[in-house]
Amino acid sequence: MKYKLPVLILVLCSVISVAQKSTKQPANMEPVVQDKLQIAEKTVIQGFVGGRLDASYLNRILAQDVNRLVAPFSNRTETSCWQSEFWGKWFTSAVLAYRYKPELLLKKKLDDAVNGLIATQTDDGYIGNYADDKHLAAWDIWGRKYCMLGLLAYYDLTKEPKALLAARKEADFLIREIADRKALIVKLGNHRGMAASSVLEPICLLYSRTGDKKYLDFAEEIVRQWETNDGPQLISKADLDVSKRFPKPKTNWYGWEQGQKAYEMMSCYEGLLELYRLTGKDIYKMAVEKTWANIHDTEINIAGSGSSMETWFNGKKMQTLPITHYQETCVTATWIKFSQQMLRLTGEAKYADAIEQTFYNALLGAMNHDGSDWAKYTPLAGQRLEGDEQCGMGLNCCVASGPRGLFTFPLTTVMTSKEGLQVNFYAAGSYSLLTPGKQKIELIQETDYPATGKISIKVKLQKPENMSLFVRIPQWSKQSALAVNGSPIRDLAPGKYFRIDRKWTNGDALELNLDMRGRVLAQGEFPRNFVIVRGPVVLSRDSRLSEIPLESAIRPMADMEGYIDLQPSDPKNPDVWMEFKAKFMPESYLEKGADPIWIDLCDYASAGNAKEGHPFFRVWLPQLLDPRVIE
């Protein structure tokens, strides 16, 4: 249907009238739909993952020059670029990092960043860097979104009223400006309005933190516009593949016509989830669930990410091919965030499985060794190369996005529910939470997972309590063993949480052993490719590890069930996290064939990820065409 502009004007005028009359004090709105899971209170992560978190904390989060992020907001001369996103991206990741590790030095940077940003706010409420006659164009609303998200994250952290007030003034000015210009938000900016209308997320968060109905009205108006002929139709097209919802752009690939833009699309669905929490409208949840499933089934590759030229392109079935500008880190981080939203809402294991796959492969693979930089694109074969600086800001969108995915991990590794605790991920460390009975409990994980599949979990609490503990059995773990205080538990189903109901006491212990056999997976028929996966980690060939060229035709020697013997070995290169040897059959022209050879493999995050230089690597292994198997 075509949306009638007079109706829009009436809606927005009503919103403005409410805004002018509103004198309500902030009052949190209880969501109609409660999340099943809540984050931990405190986490200390050790081991390899802890080291990655510490590196990013020190060399990316703390190292950021806050004044450089604030500076563009004082100039207001921009006409087309996206400098205004960088403050909010850094700030929201820094708040996540601070919640994980609350240090005074970072708190001061957060304070300075907020004070510096608010100082640039105009009397009419604008925080942005666009020239007056270019307001609402290009990436202006997108940047305002990130400013509001950062201000709201600071308010949630500190309850500082000036941050909430600044976010409200920014939102109120946006609503007023759109109405004054008689504009449709889906016709503003890029990507069929998805970039601009992803402001839905902070608008919903403002309603939940103020109870001011004008924000709920504006949120619903955004969603109504989505379903117009000019909109991205994110609800009505939820049954379609995300790569096929609109024709390919005829002129500007990154312009308004582009309806397959991956990052912005998922950002809109994050906002729609927030609106679902506020309204309970099942149509919103159904659209999100269908789209998440379609992205997972048609786009997400073996490393847990996707996109080419930053758009969906039905890429899962093409992942063995050389692909241009593949697997943007902004997409990787947002896929994790999107999946975390669904995990928090539903508690379902498939979302945790997806997050784990992406975290250990695509995300960690994009991060350099000292955590100071992130690759913009990370292929499955080739080299890991740095991206360009953008907008004169000293970084690019992906360097800003990477930590936003990384720091979602700590406080969601173990979460709470009304029934008890849920162990989503495995990483050495301690996890402090509240039980359903409101007493403090600490779970201590002892493990070097995923280097091995052995995980020990010990319980520390003051007094015994009846509750449930949910332990995730990953989809890939077909042979798992679990014991509580030495007593084995049977019937563990892969891809599910195993629920343990009992009276938990101080000193109780769980022992979990996951199936870490190497798995050989195939893609395609002609040509056919193999990949080796161990636990959640994709393995790769790397030119640093072997004299045998990467282009050599070799076939992994798997058994009838598709498992391959992997022998751990000490990494020859200090840049490599995990290394294994496996037997392969090489190409041969001898009548009797060749003898097997040993090939070194490393984890995907380490492949091509060197402190110096750009070594070549390959995940998918092309196989020789054999006419005996062609029908």
Image (cartoon, rainbow, N blue to C red):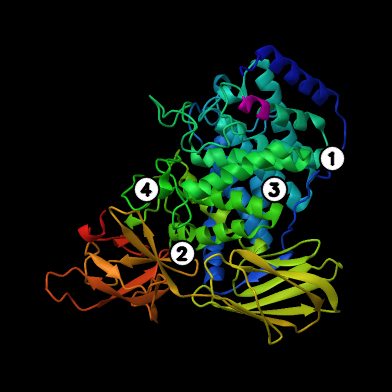
Judging by the rendered image, the residue that carries numbered circle 1 is: 26
Judging by the rendered image, the residue that carries numbered circle 4 is: 318
Dot 2, crowdedness within 10 Å: few (<14), some or many (≥20)? some
Dot 1, crowdedness within 10 Å: few (<14), some or many (≥20)? some
From the viewer's perspective, tell me whether residue 551 is left or right of residue 279: left
The foreground one among 125 and 384 is 384
First reached walking from the N terminus: tag 4 or tag 2 = 4
Which secondary structure lies at badge 3?
helix
The foreground one among 523 and 114 is 523
Which secondary structure lies at badge 4?
helix
First reached walking from the N terminus: tag 3 or tag 4 = 3
Judging by the rendered image, the residue that carries numbered circle 2 is: 370
Does residue 232 show up?
Answer: yes
Q: Residue at x 37, y 45 (%)?
A: 325
First reached walking from the N terminus: tag 4 or tag 1 = 1
Query: Where residue 509 sits in the image (x, y, percent)?
Result: 70, 82
**What number is the disc on residue 153?**
3
Residue numbers of the magenta segment: 223-227
Q: Is residue 594 above or below residue 364?
A: below
Given this view, does label 4 or label 2 mark the residue nearer the observer? 4
Q: Is residue 168 above or below residue 514?
A: above
Disc 1 residue type (three-letter): Pro
Query: Where residue 20 sits in the image (x, y, percent)?
Result: 82, 23
